[in-house]
Amino acid sequence: MSGETLAGGSVDVAIIGAGAAGVGAARRLQALRPDLSLVLLEASDRIGGRARTVRPADLGGFALDLGCGWLHGARTNAWTGIAEEIGLTVDRTPAPWSEGGRQLQRDDSDAKAARIAANEFFERIYAHDGEEDAALSALLTSDNPWNGYIQALGAFLTGAELDRSSVIDQSRYDPGQGPDWRVRQGYGTLVATYAAPVMVHTGAEVRRIDHSAVDHVSLSTAKGDLRAKAVIIAVSTNILAAERIAFWPPLPDKVEAASQLPLGLANKLFLQPRTPEAFPADGHILGSYHSGRTGGYQLRPFGAPVIEAYFAGDLAHDLEREGIDAAFDFSVEQLKRFFGSGIEGMLSPAVMSTWASEPFVGGSYSYAVPGASDLRQVLAAPHDQRLFFAGEACSRMRYSTAHGAYETGSAAAEAIAKTLA
């Protein structure tokens, strides 16, 4: 829904943000308490949040995920079962980084040595005593020739450079039992389709939440004012930290927690090859094992006529600012190292994500600055049993994932179902 106004309306529960957390919360609440009225408010013009699938006509209508694309920890990932429940196809082709995956550089001497160095780095993370936090960069060894590769991995994982990310937070990360699978129709399609039974208002940016009254919460939105008995806030930490939603009375602890759990950045660029069959389906290469400023390249995912380039951290910020042509030129130069200089005339840029510029998101997924990992619980804690918070940043172990977001939304719904009993 986009044209309807909310002026003077009243519901039992209002949910802010129609991403994985908000949609998950709405569906869980419908299942638990069908007697409660609820509305899902989305500031943008679409459903899905950081799960976004596009189908460019000039690429044959193939589903391309500009945001989250992998069902990480697929065997325990709630979205795996949901996808099958609503009739979408879960593709079980091994991810390139897993056993049986098509990592084209797997047997290269550089790749082997880099993986050993990375494994040792992660062992130091998980052996960290947890008493005093540090930046991930503190665990690098100065004489390691593979530090560039480790820095690239760190950026892929957190969306930020190692010197900004918490060791303790990374040591807690656990997406659940693998492997990693995909949804053929797209992760964005999955989230949006699951939202179908929910009343969603798009273009309904929430600007102010007044929780000063005893018996209700007042929401000021772009479509008018609304009253609710309880509210779930499922928006990104960058939106909360920037105080794009004003709380009255103020909630400084929430704003501070959000500011210390900022969104890192990961962007995708899809390249269109003139002769797709020249590239192996579902193959993968890394642009460089010697530099932190590198892309990862998925060749013809699902056999589609595209190459998916993945950039993270400072490189992603730089390429987003410079635009799609700069990202394309960077990718071509890296791909030349593997395929030779003749590849330059075989590719053209198709579509690129720009998550830092998304006005109602501002990035990709959260990371904790050193010393801030415990603030995930502060962000997630309900306020006055009327304001509930959800989203991937609220997950202690599954942050940065869509199923972590879903789990926090479901937990908020369960709490409200009891509170409004």
Image (spheres, rainbow, N blue to C red):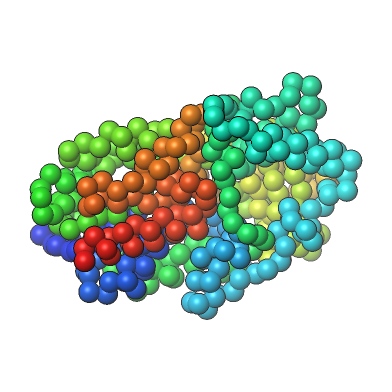
Q: Where on the picture, by quarter, is residue 379? A: top left
- Between 284 and 237, the residue placed more toward the observer is 237
Residue in the picture at 41% in, 55% down = 408
Residue in the picture at 88% in, 48% down = 107
Looking at the figure, which quarter contains the N terminus?
bottom left
- Please say if 303 is above or below 298: below
| In this rendering, position of residue 194 left or right of residue 56 | left
- Between 378 and 325, the residue placed more toward the observer is 378
Rendering coords of residue 71 (x, y %): 58, 61
Q: In this rendering, does residue 186 appear at all?
A: no
| In this rendering, position of residue 303 left or right of residue 136 | right
Looking at the figure, which quarter contains the C terminus?
bottom left
Count of labels in the image: 0
Rendering coords of residue 175 (x, y %): 58, 53
- Between 205 and 394, the residue placed more toward the observer is 394
| In this rendering, position of residue 245 left or right of residue 164 | left
Rendering coords of residue 378 (x, y %): 37, 40
Q: In this rendering, does residue 282 appear at all?
A: yes
- Between 274 and 162, the residue placed more toward the observer is 162
Residue in the picture at 58% in, 27% down = 135
- Please say if 343 is above or below 37: above
Q: Going by the picture, which residue comes out furthest to the top?
A: 142
Q: Where on the picture, by quarter, is residue 100? A: bottom right
- Please say if 87 is above or below 13: below
Rendering coords of residue 236 (x, y %): 39, 45
Residue in the picture at 33% in, 62% down = 413
Q: Where on the picture, by quarter, is residue 149? A: top right
